[in-house]
Image (spheres, rainbow, N blue to C red):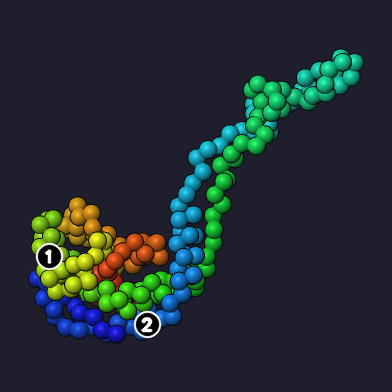
Amino acid sequence: MKTSLYNLSGKVIKEITLPKAIFDAKVNDQLIAQSIRVYLNNQRSAHAKVKHRGEVAGTTKKMYAQKGTGRARHSTAKAPQFVGGGSAHAPTGKQFPKLKMSQKLRQAALRSLLTKFAKNKAIILIDKISTIEAKTKAAVKLIAELKKAESSLAKSRRFAIITSRQPKNVKKAFGNLPEVSLLSTNSLNSYELSRQSFLIFTPAALKQLQK
């Protein structure tokens, strides 16, 4: 499977063959969904937490004698039924336990997603993007030229530029464009990829992805 390598003027330099191991893998939609669910779950944190009776400050002394008072038996004032006592069934701060997914399965999910993009012809490469001028108008001009050459990109509401590293000038150039996501190969995940309609790789990012 081949794709085009563009320069910063939006012109095709040459055709690049995408590695089959990554862009021609078996597509597993169930695995993709599982990977996204694990990622989203692990981004959640439980802010709600209250103290149970073992965490409330105060004495553990028995409130009054067990027998002889005619009243119900009680232990300490920390019991949930008393004002100032601990809560019985309140949130503990552990409502969202972390889910685990092996590296092998995460990589398989990524390969499935990347294969989908490749089959839909929604992947191109761009050369020397690290030398782009650190201005939004330079990024807008480049994207406009790429959209003229790639109809799939022109129809995309959201697309990602994937680099091996993110120089400051690249962040400044594309940072103000809501339709563009700047992703790094070091932190690539199924959730971020699934939100995109088109992918733009740098040659260095493609090499790093193979490793």
Residue at 69% across / 22% down in the picture? 82
Total numbered labels placed on residues in the image: 2
Circle 1 Cα neighbour tier, 10 Å, few/some/many (<14 / 14–19 / ≥20) = some
Answer with the quarter of the image where residue 21 lies. Answer: bottom left
Residue 92 percent coordinates (x, y) = 59, 40
**The disc labelled 2 sits on which kind of residue?**
Asp
Q: Secondary structure at mark 1?
A: helix
Residue at 33% across / 83% down in the picture? 19
Answer with the quarter of the image where residue 207 lies. Answer: bottom left
Residue 105 percent coordinates (x, y) = 49, 71
Residue 131 percent coordinates (x, y) = 14, 66
Residue at 32% across / 74% down in the picture? 117
From the viewer's side, name the closer residue of 200 and 31: 31
Q: 135 above or below 185?
A: above
For marks 1 and 2, the one nearer the N-term is 2
Q: Residue furthest right?
A: 68
Q: Label 2: which residue?
A: 24
Q: Is residue 185 left or right of residue 143?
A: right
Q: Label 1: which residue?
A: 144
Circle 2 Cα neighbour tier, 10 Å, few/some/many (<14 / 14–19 / ≥20) = some
Residue at 65% across / 37% down in the picture? 89
CA distance for labels 1 and 2? 29 Å
Q: Is residue 89 left or right of residue 186?
A: right
Q: Is residue 28 left or right of residue 144?
A: right
Quadrant of the image containing the N terminus: bottom left
From the viewer's side, name the closer residue of 207 and 107: 107
Q: Residue furthest front?
A: 155
Q: Which mark is residue 153?
A: none
Can residue 105 be seen here? yes
**The disc labelled 1 sits on which kind of residue?**
Ala
